[in-house]
């Protein structure tokens, strides 16, 4: 494996900064040096870039982010998305600082709109983060209708990276961006599309299936199964 592909390219700069600071700390205190080393290892881990096996059957919508599903509900999409005034299912995935933060395209299509909004930095797990936090939205034109997915900065996150532009043709599972360091992803499904996930489930970007455009299954319910 090419070592440059082990972590996201943006991560090398931060790993270098963390390593340099660790060296400086170690010159003054062995304890501080160990703390810095732990933080440097965490920084390397945060920007990791694992390979993913993406299901490619027509009609599948895969998760664009790693993390935990925290909200599944119908809401009126923001006017900026130009997806109408009828409520659509929104799936919200929260990424903590230990999740992979590289984002992936959820479905084949053409990038119809890229919309950036500056904003605040509430805890990304809160519902109001969708409206008030800094965010970057992509509206994807697919053969099954428009799909929107939103990178949302969180309490710690201060940088959203998006590497696609309007008019780009993109493939499901391909990498398109990054949020650092802790964040959220909202996905708006087309009208009438039921989610195949429920609150509490953990998602793997590029692998976990959020919805199936060819399925008429009812919205899924879940429960926690107690262990022995």
Image (cartoon, rainbow, N blue to C red):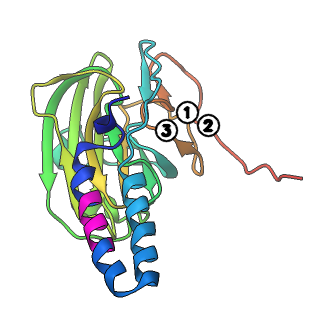
- Image-based side of 191 in relation to 209, left or right: left
Q: Residue furthest top?
A: 58
- Image-based side of 103 in relation to 165, left or right: right
Residue at numbered disc 3: 204
Residue at numbered disc 1: 196
Q: Which residue lies furthest to the front in this view?
A: 27
> Do the residues bearing badges 3 and 1 touch, measured as CB atoms within 8 Å?
no
Residue 13, by quadrant, is: bottom left
* SS of the residue under disc 3: loop
Crowding around mark 1 (Cα neighbors within 10 Å: few <14, some 14 to 19, many 20+) is: some
| Span colored in magenta | 15-22
Comparing 67 with 77, the one in front is: 67
Q: Residue 220 carries which label?
A: 2
Which callout, 3 or 2, points at the residue further toward the start of the chain? Answer: 3
Depicted 14 relative to depicted 139: above or below: below
Residue 206, by quadrant, is: top left
* SS of the residue under disc 2: loop
Crowding around mark 3 (Cα neighbors within 10 Å: few <14, some 14 to 19, many 20+) is: some
Q: Which residue is drawn at 42% across and 53% down?
A: 45
């Amino acid at each position: 494996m090419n070592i440059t592909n082990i972590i996201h390219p943006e991560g090398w700069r931060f790993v270098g900064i963390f390593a340099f600071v660790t060296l400086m700390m170690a010159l003054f205190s062995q304890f501080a040096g160990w703390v810095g080393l732990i933080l440097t290892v965490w920084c390397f881990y945060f920007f990791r870039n694992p390979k993913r096996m993406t299901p490619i059957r027509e009609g599948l919508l895969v998760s664009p982010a790693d993390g935990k599903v925290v909200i599944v509900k119908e809401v009126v999409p923001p006017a900026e998305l130009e997806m109408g005034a009828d409520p659509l299912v929104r799936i919200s995935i929260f990424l903590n600082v230990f999740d992979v933060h590289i984002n992936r395209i959820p479905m084949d299509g053409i990038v119809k709109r890229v919309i950036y909004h500056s904003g605040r930095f509430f805890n990304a797990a809160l519902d109001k983060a969708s409206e008030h936090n800094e965010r970057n939205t992509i509206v994807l034109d697919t053969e099954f209708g428009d799909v929107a997915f939103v990178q949302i900065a969180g309490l710690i996150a201060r940088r959203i990276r998006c590497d696609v532009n309007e008019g780009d043709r993109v493939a499901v599972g391909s990498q398109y961006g990054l949020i650092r360091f802790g964040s959220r992803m909202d996905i708006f499904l087309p009208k009438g599309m039921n989610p195949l996930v429920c609150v509490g489930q953990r998602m793997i970007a590029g692998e976990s299936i959020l919805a199936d455009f060819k399925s008429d299954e009812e919205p899924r319910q879940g429960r926690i199964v107690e262990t022995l």
